[in-house]
Image (tube, rainbow, N blue to C red):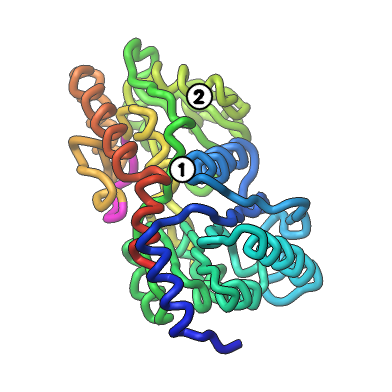
Amino acid sequence: MRFNHVRIGAILRRRSLKGFVRVFALAPDCHTAGRYMRVWRRHFYDGLQAALPSVVLPVAVDFAWARPPAQAPQGPSADRDATSERLWDQIRTAHAARGLDAVISYCFSSDIDPALIERTVELGVPWINFFCDSTYAFDLVEALARVTSLNWFPELAAQARYRALGRPVLCRPYAVHPAALPESICETAEHALGFVGAPTGNRVLRLAGLRLFGCRTEVRGEGWQRTTAAPTRVQQRPLTDDEMAPFLSRCRVVLGLNEGRDTQGIYGSYLKLRDVEFPGYGCCYLTQHNEDVAHAFEVGREVLTFRNAAEAASLVRRSVRHPTQARAIGQAGRGRVLAEHTWAARLRELARVL
């Protein structure tokens, strides 16, 4: 399909001047499970709805065929075609009724047909897609990235691959919903170090390494099994929404483990949603160091980062000895998130880039 670039360019310029008023939002649930399904719901759909006058959500669009995503077909399929047609009907109807300023999505190429994006853009509605695993799974989004109006991603290392496609880009962290982040600054320090998450990737080894340096971790999350390498205490179920803030406020430091494994099996650290979410609560947040975290926060003043277990354990001990400083780091991190990493802030940037 050939785009009328002059006409669409004019539409985008008008929209960038006035900002977004009404958007269609799409975040398939096939890429989340357990606690993360609730997290994405709160921070994507609820966050957009709180930041904009009007948000149109998909109705009766089932991505069960794409779960788990590792088993979803990576090319054309009858399920993907049917889902794309259903979405096209809803997008076209919403635009005809009251107009749409954009579609904002978090989609893999296995979720929707790239032709859906092309048809939507030809309709005069720009399509923005967010993807947060670009450094090790770019192939899972490349087909969509070639046709979207704007590719939004958090990893600096992925910029060259996106820019090579000749599409506009925004390299910025994911946006969060402030109402989903009640202030949880530590006061009691019942736990020196806390972690929330499942035992995916090499997290067990990372926590075992911390334990060797005398730094034991209080863990919340499902899937953990008691072993000699496990943290001292594990609650083997996800925290409910009501339990999250109280747990975080009892931890002097909250740990982030943000590695992903590429197709060669090599682990690499990059910015994840948790690296914005947990500082947003006001925790003294300690995560693995990478250029993305350093780009989003002032390391040492708003968040803490480590390169190895010995450094992490040392930072935890220092935070325990200096609780006032640890609380100040949590407050500064929360201030940065609420100022720069909310949907209100990110939507302004997205409109400006378009």
Amino acid at circle 2: Met
Q: Provide the residue span drawn in magenta.
A: 286-292
Is 289 contained in the magenta span? yes
Judge depth for marks 1 and 2 and give the one in front: 1
- When the figure is inspected, residue 312 is found, relative to residue 150, above or below; the finding is above
Q: Residues within 10 Å of mark 2 (few under 14, many from 20)?
A: some
The reply to whether dot 1 and dot 2 touch (C-beta < 8 Å) is: no
Residue under label 2: 244
Compute the Cα span from label 1 to label 2. 23 Å
Residue under label 1: 51
What residue is shown at x 23% (from left), y 29% (from top)?
329
Residue 12 is situated, as x and y percent measured from the top left of the image, at: 43, 70
Look at the image and tell me in which quarter the C terminus lies.
Answer: bottom left
Residue 95 is situated, as x and y percent measured from the top left of the image, at: 63, 63
Residue 33 is situated, as x and y percent measured from the top left of the image, at: 64, 43
71 with respect to 162 (left or right): right
